[in-house]
Image (spheres, rainbow, N blue to C red):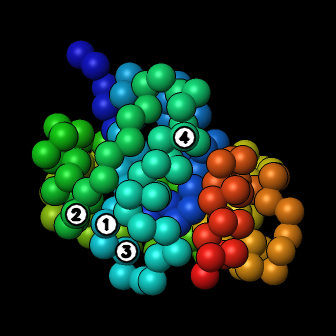
Amino acid sequence: MSSKAIYPGTFDPITLGHVNILEKASKLFDTIILAVADYTGKQNLFSLEERERLCAEAVSHLPNVEVATFEGLSVDFARSRDCRVMIRGLRAVSDFEYELSLALTNTKLDPGIETIFLVPSLRYMYLSSSLIRQLAELGSELKDFVPETVAKALLEKLKDG
């Protein structure tokens, strides 16, 4: 039996921390679906199509990771793709409360879906997409935080905006 999991999120933008979680998960599962959420509840810098493209470029070195977009609840998307495992990343204790409440809510919505928490490598523990956007707005070097294609896209987006 093959194993499949989804890693849902906004990925606005995808960071090296996200990629690190996917690299770890790709060793645990036959297939990982990087699920880019349409609805995020916040103002996005990148459109859904841009986020999908940037994610695909960032994970092109991982043959068992596919990128897909979805609308609605992540549990509904997981069910539609026959996934019973959802991957979530934990960086710090501050993430735990939110991620635990999300996992418990998802279990209530679909008791057949399990959430697995993965921790990024120490060098990526502090990274967040919102931090990356702030650094980009302030003109910081981004090569240690995001894939090169994402850094270029951020610079272009902020130059145009």
Label 1: few (<14), some (14–19) or many (≥20) C-alpha neighbours in 10 Å: some
Q: Amino acid at mark 3?
A: Thr
Q: Separation of disc 4 and disc 3 at Cα?
A: 21 Å
Q: Separation of disc 2 and disc 1 at Cα?
A: 5 Å
Q: Which residue is located at x 20 percent, y 67 percent?
A: 72
Q: Which residue is located at x 35 percent, y 50 percent?
A: 35
Residue identified by numbered label 2: 71
Q: Are marks 2 and 1 in contact (CB under 8 Å)?
A: yes
Q: Are marks 1 and 3 in contact (CB under 8 Å)?
A: yes
Residue identified by numbered label 4: 57
Q: Nearer the viewer, residue 13 or 80?
A: 13
Label 2: few (<14), some (14–19) or many (≥20) C-alpha neighbours in 10 Å: few
Label 4: few (<14), some (14–19) or many (≥20) C-alpha neighbours in 10 Å: some
Q: Secondary structure at mark 1?
A: loop
Q: Separation of disc 1 and disc 3 at Cα?
A: 6 Å
Q: Name the mark nearer the viewer: 1 or 4.
A: 4
Q: Amino acid at mark 2?
A: Glu
Residue farthest along the top direction in this orientation: 1
Label 3: few (<14), some (14–19) or many (≥20) C-alpha neighbours in 10 Å: some
